[in-house]
Image (cartoon, rainbow, N blue to C red):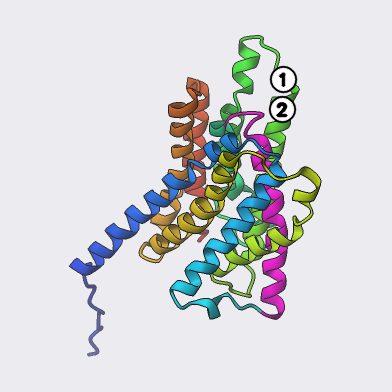
Amino acid sequence: MQTKTIAPSFPMTFPDTIRERHGLWLMVAGGALLGTIGIFVQEANQHPLVTVWFRCGFGALALLLWSAATGKLNDLQLRGKSLLIACATGCLMVLNWAMFFAAIPRTSIAVATVVFHIQPIWVIVFSAVFLREPVSKGQWIATPVALLGLALTTGLLDDLQSVRIVSGDYITGLLLCMGGSLSYAAVTLLAKSKQVIPAFTLSFWQCAVGTVVLAWVPFEFGLPPQLSAWAWLAGLGVIHTGFAYVVLFAGMARLSLGKIAVLQFVYPLAAVLFDWGVYGTTLSVVQWTGVLLMGLSVWAIRKPAR
């Protein structure tokens, strides 16, 4: 009689626990840093394209210096199809950031950031329609729930209930943020191609491409006359694109995909809290309900179809 051999399952060791704990705190720190992006955009008070160009330029420089300091310059080299994908995603990231930065002063940091985070829904829908990827029943159920949450988060239903007139500028801001989330979804789909590019390398090339594509911007709109604006813009590149990305990627390397998906909600939550703490922006009960619905739906939709 044959005996069935069962592979032993080993519990997580102490070093693994320490590594995972470090990864958790790195992800939280990175998400909290990204949550301050809106403050830097508001305080710099520049044209959205000027803000994007500075973020790309300082971000590319910060990532390049980090690669040189850690001896990983060779990791930034791309050729052939990988280079084309990196350039395409770079152009889409420019569009994404420009729309997002333009949406913030028209809505608020909190609303723009939360609305922008509907993008995982577009990724699932586009993957199913264009790439024929399998979608679970739960993911399809989560999609309309997320869209309902999106509608509540915008605050439009609050305005209708109180018979207030919704400003055209606010609507424009919401549409810009939706457009930004769609372009970021396209970036995600391109990054999921068979040509695998490390996240750090892709981030550098996106910033480098953005710097070149928008090289005309300072000639058209001029450079900021205030030194303080330069400091805020440099922070967007060095802190939010250089340092924050390094911290996030280091955290991701220590965690499972499921935990990474959950911890990515630190960013929009931090943005809401910073907007409240710095500018006094508060969300209504209806909007908080929408944020909760979006968070639960996006968390559910990230689970792979079986």
Q: Position of residue 292 (x, y in %)?
A: 46, 34
Which residue shows up at 59% across the image and 32% down it? 148
| Relative height, residue 258 to residue 254 (above, below) | above
Q: Please indicate, yes or no, whether residue 153 appears anywhere in the rendered image.
A: yes
Magenta span contains residue 269: no
Which residue shows up at 23% across the image and 62% down it? 18
Q: Nearer the viewer, residue 60 or 138?
A: 60
Magenta region, main secondary structure: helix
Q: Position of residue 250 (x, y in %)?
A: 40, 63
Q: Tell me if mark 2 has few (under 14), some (14-19) or many (20+) residues whose alpha carbon lies within 10 angstroms of its own.
A: some
Q: Tell me how far mark 2 sits from mark 1, CA to CA.
A: 7 Å
Q: Give the residue type at disc 1.
A: Ser
Q: Position of residue 173 (x, y in %)?
A: 69, 32
Q: Give the residue type at disc 2.
A: Ile
Q: Residue furthest top?
A: 163
Q: Position of residue 69 (x, y in %)?
A: 45, 72
Q: Residue furthest bottom?
A: 1
**Which span is picked out in magenta?**
79-108
Indicate the quadrant containing the N terminus: top left, top right, bottom left or bottom right: bottom left
| Relative height, residue 18 to residue 169 (above, below) | below
For the image shown, how many numbered marks are present on the structure?
A: 2
| Relative height, residue 14 to residue 277 (above, below) | below
Dot 1 lies on which element?
loop
Which residue shows up at 46% across the image and 57% down it? 243
Q: Please indicate, yes or no, whether residue 265 appears anywhere in the rendered image.
A: no
Q: Which residue is mark 1?
A: 167
| Relative height, residue 135 to residue 35 (above, below) | below
**Residue 158: numbered disc:** none
Q: Which residue is mark 2?
A: 171
Dot 2 lies on which element?
helix
| Residue contact at pointers 2 and 1, CB within 8 angstroms | yes
